[in-house]
Image (tube, rainbow, N blue to C red):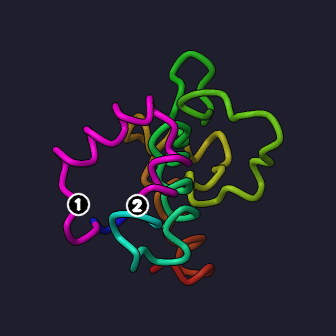
Amino acid sequence: MEGLDGLGVKTSHQLVRQFKGDINRVISYLRLEKLKNLPEDYEARFRKAELTFRHQRVYDPRTKKLTFLNPLPEGLDASELDFLGEDLPDDIAHGIATGKGIDIFKKLFKSLTAFGFI
């Protein structure tokens, strides 16, 4: 997510502290007082970035499956959160994580190509 002109790390940190971590209030303040040209979709993009940071898909070597870094908040449907990472079949996820099985990478490459990612 791109930064905002006139809003650096130091000011961002001060605002989060001032509003006791309430991001809704920070964004409202920015929109009303500080950055009147805040993009309309900024809050939605911020939420998406926050979800990605907290809940990205990761490989769990104990279960040998992909899982979310942290449990998803109630009410969120994992099938609508493709930006957190594709839910790969277990064999492909295991092959990527362990670096074993070139055939697994070939399957993944074909999938990514078929869906237009590559």
Q: Which residue bears the numbered disc 1? A: 7
Compare residues 4 and 18 and report the one nearer the observer: 18
Residue 37 placement: quadrant: bottom left
Q: Which residue bears the numbered disc 2? A: 30
Of the residues shown, which amino acid type is indicated by label 1?
Leu
Q: Secondary structure at mark 1?
A: loop
| Residue at x-position 42% and y-position 54% | 102
Q: Is residue 5 magenta?
A: yes
Of the residues shown, which amino acid type is indicated by label 2?
Leu
| Residue at x-position 57% and y-position 60% | 83
Compare residues 30 and 57 and report the one nearer the observer: 30
| Residue at x-position 49% and y-position 42% | 95
Q: Are marks 1 and 2 in contact (CB under 8 Å)?
A: yes
| Residue at x-position 75% and y-position 59% | 80
Compare residues 89 and 32 and report the one nearer the observer: 32
Q: Position of residue 90 (x, y in %)?
A: 65, 39
Q: Position of residue 65 (x, y in %)?
A: 62, 32
